[in-house]
Amino acid sequence: MPLTALDIYKVLPKTNCGECGVPTCLAFAMSLATKKAAIDACPYATDDAKATLAGAAAPPIRLVSIGPEAQCIVMGNETVLFRHEETFYHPTAIAVRIRTDRSPEELKAEFERVQAMVFDRVGQYVRVEMVALEDVDGDPGRFAAAAALADGMGLALMLMSDAPAVIESALAGISAHRPLLYAATADNWEAMAALAKARACPLVVRGKDLDELADLTRRIAALGVTDLVLDSGARGLGATLSDLTQIRRLALRRQFRPLGYPAMAFVTAQDPIDQVTEGTAYLCKYAGLVVTDGLQDWQALAMLTARQNIYTDPQKPIQIEPGVRAIGKPDASSPVLITTNFSLTYFTVEADVEASHTAAWALIVDTEGQSVLTAWAADKFTAETIAKALAASDLADRVTHRKAVLPGGVATLSGKLEELSGWEIMVGPRESAGMTMFMRNRWRPSEVAPTS
Ligand code: SF4
């Protein structure tokens, strides 16, 4: 819970000297409680007072970053249980678990497969971010070589071994890239914490249940290692989801600091479809990191699509730049299609036009990222806004006709739009899936009128 003015007042000097800019310590405490002042303004605040206030101001779920600074993976610092309350901020990282009992050639091929899991979806690149490298035979040399190979290929890493010495062997060459160390347990936590501290790496803490986990994080944090990720030890969908939910609730609702860190989960299903279902459940609730085995491209795309949807701010739809875009290689006789700047709408139209094996000019109207009918209902996709966008564009120079295609769902705008724009408005299909038929049956190059 946030500190009240009275809580803060208790740790101030209570001398009412006024040097902080207000006449009394109580007034200063009230300013601090409402975040109108910073503790630094009081020259007499003790270190204890500063630590108390800093602790109260800390986010309920610590922000933890993994990997090199320039391209680090960030998790934690979430503030809500439900996305509609605000938004989820840091998309769940996805790691593919790769065991090190393979030849260097096989490992390299696996790493390359992970590297290639990058997809262009609705104008954004989504990717699998990490490799979870697992030591299976306790061989430090083999583990270090595999880690160096992955690191050299630019992959973010989680180094998995119960033996601190094995992880230390791998860290010698790559600790500057801040791999995530897995894992501190009741048996090795002191050595793992020392390693994490010495190498400034984030550390996974694994308990056999939430009580042991909280006990371990308290001890490790007391050693000065605070970039922690939680593994409750649960495996399987039901138990893992239950622990992830409890961790999130305790951190946010109770401000329970020992569990105030991002949490992770392992996919354990064997069936490929079940793997996707399980992994997706974890990224919805509430894993900062999901580790899965043998991920195929189609599985990765399914999980990344779900992640992209869950981690899009519901109040800020994914948008593209308004203006004119070429779909395919349009020419002066190609149709002009009117659409909105909601990414999903535009890229659906684009895909459907491409599927029809034609080319077109897209006039993308700024609707603040809303889809056709939503924008129309909100008065952002009107005859006036479309006519204005058309006039501001250079489409009149790009095409030799004056015909534009309006989405069928807003056919009611066609008359007024014709009046305002001076263009002939054709009513297109209600869904862009009908674009192939529309292009085939309604749009005719022979209908092109000469430019006047
Ligand atoms: Fe109190 Fe510090 Fe302000 Fe002086 S400067 S009034 S001691 S809070």
Image: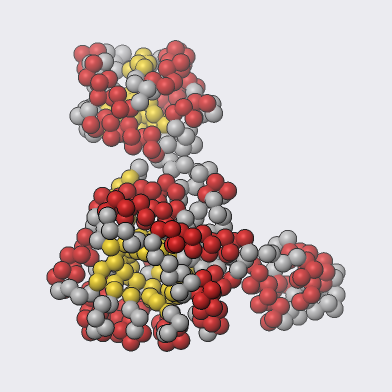
| Looking at the image, residue 382 lies above or below residue 70 | above
| Looking at the image, residue 106 lies above or below residue 448 | below
Question: Residue, x 47% and y 55% (percent of image)?
Answer: 285
Give the number of callouts. 0
Question: Residue, x 24% and y 71% (percent of image)?
Answer: 99
Question: Residue, x 44% and y 62% (percent of image)?
Answer: 240
Q: Is residue 171 visible?
A: no
| Looking at the image, residue 393 lies above or below residue 28 | above
Name the one closer to the observer, 372 or 102. Answer: 102
Image quarter where the C terminus lies is top left
Horizontal and vertical percent for residue 169? Answer: 30, 85
| Looking at the image, residue 414 lies above or below residue 161 | above
Name the one closer to the observer, 16 or 143. Answer: 143
Horizontal and vertical percent for residue 53? Answer: 68, 72
Name the one closer to the observer, 179 or 293. Answer: 293
Q: Is residue 183 visible?
A: yes
Q: How is the image coloured?
A: secondary structure
Horizontal and vertical percent for residue 266? Answer: 37, 64
Question: Residue, x 82% and y 72% (percent of image)?
Answer: 25
Name the one closer to the observer, 274 or 76. Answer: 274
Horizontal and vertical percent for residue 346? Answer: 36, 34
Image quarter where the N terminus lies is bottom right
Dividing the picture into quadrants, the one containing residue 418 is top left
